[in-house]
Image (cartoon, helix red, strand yellow):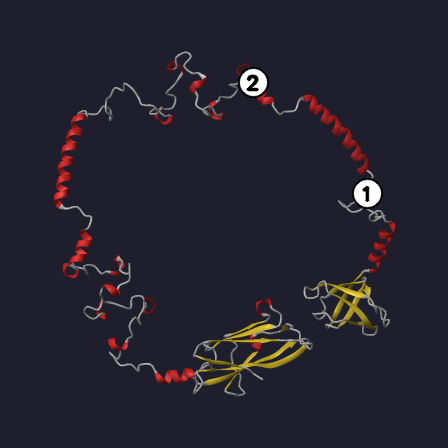
Amino acid sequence: MSQYWGDFPVSATVRIPFSTFNSSGASVTMTGFAASDIEIYKNGGLTQRASDNGYTATTDFDSLTGLHIIVIDTSDNSDAGFFAAGNEYQVAVSSVTIDTQTVSFWAGTFSIERSGGALALIKALAPAGVLSNNAIAAASIAADAITAAKIADGAIDAATFAAGAINAAAIATDAITAAKIAADAIGASELAADAITEIQSGLATAAALDVVDNFLDTEITDIQSRLPAALVIGRMDSNMQAAANGVITAAVIATDAIDADALADGAITAATFAAGAIDAAAIAADAIGSSELAASAVTEIQNGLATQASVDTIDDFLDTEIVAIKAKTDNLTFTTALQVDANTLAIDSSASAAAHLKDHSLTAVPVTFSGGTTTTAVLVNVDGAAATGTDDFYNGRVLIFTAPGGLKYQATDITDYVGATKTATITAVTTAVGATTTAIMV
């Protein structure tokens, strides 16, 4: 039964999801699904839409096996006039492969503003141009019906409003910005008395400004009387008798201003230096020799360092140990570079465990296939050689699949083997065996 997906407006996008299953009812993917496999018929006619433009075919939607979707853009007019109001459409999927079978099927139907449908009836009730000028009066609009979201940007200009239509209650907080007001739009007649009071709030009056002006005149005159009449080389000539603590900083003193002549004998003592004042940049190369280091400084430098005698002891120990290690590593063989040859004789001190592991490893062989289903597998090579032609030869053996992803790590047993076709019957797995499938037979 084909599903009806609904009635859509002109130029709408139609999405049709569908699923695919194998013969056991499990979800499976399909192959070969493309836009060219989508066929759309109009009003039950036998002529398909001439163009595949506007179709999108998605297999395994969101990477979910067996879930697919068709997207149809009815605004695409590559086949002129095909998608139009008042018509019904049937959507088919033609010639795709599902569970190794080639199938075609109906994906569903839809309509565009179908005759007698809700969309067509609504259009009939309010066709374009049905409202005459001034048909909508103030009484026609419910209170609070028009919100900010209903009004397009720039839709309202000065001619839109009736006289007195805008009052304080109609304007949202911060709704009126500088960009919204035309030049010279607000004059004296547009300002209410409380608006003028609000604007003037906090501003100085002319009388207050006169008081400030007179004060500045008096103070500036007093300051000028204390300054010299002229500057000396752009500066005030002065005689500094004392400086407050911290006034003279490093930035105040010019580079090289303090030289040997400027320093009195003994002027620099330990107390003269601030913590961290002497850094690497302050010390000239080779300035500190053995005579400049106090005994305590030498002790501090040597603290934690090894003596020469300790180093000699470590050197002798390493010589002995390295020779012993080399004597053992010289006995190792490397048939392949960087890989040590090894022969495991025991596992956890058990020689029999190692022997069992060897026997098991020798019986686990690689297998390739040419195809199959979820319950059959056609063998190509077993352990690098062609699969045997002897019936039941592999019965009871176990296949552990190593690729592809859908089969990887699944295990199944061989219940029957036909040598003529090299086909093994296996316990069902979730994904069909294919030409890219590989496995280990144990």
Front-most of residues 125 and 193 = 193
From what the image shows, is residue 69 above or below residue 177? below
Answer with left or right where residue 120 lies relative to residue 316: left
Vertical order, 49 against 347 (above or below)? below
Count of numbered tags: 2
Q: Which residue has dot 2 on it?
A: 296
Badges 1 and 2: C-beta atoms under 8 Å apart?
no
Q: Residue furthest top?
A: 265
- Identify the image quadrant of residue 209: top left
Residue 347 lies, in percent from the top left, at: 83, 49
* Residue drawn at the location 83% of the way across and 39% of the way down: 331
- Residue 372 in the image, given as x and y percentages of width and height: 74, 72
In the image, residue 386 sits, relative to residue 23, either above or below, namely above
Q: Which mark is residue 291?
A: none
Image coordinates for residue 142, horizontal then vertical, percent: 29, 74
Label 1 packing within 10 angstroms: few (<14), some (14-19), many (20+): few
For the residue pair 356 and 363, the one nearer the viewer reads as 356
- Disc 1: which residue: 333
Res. 137 in view? no
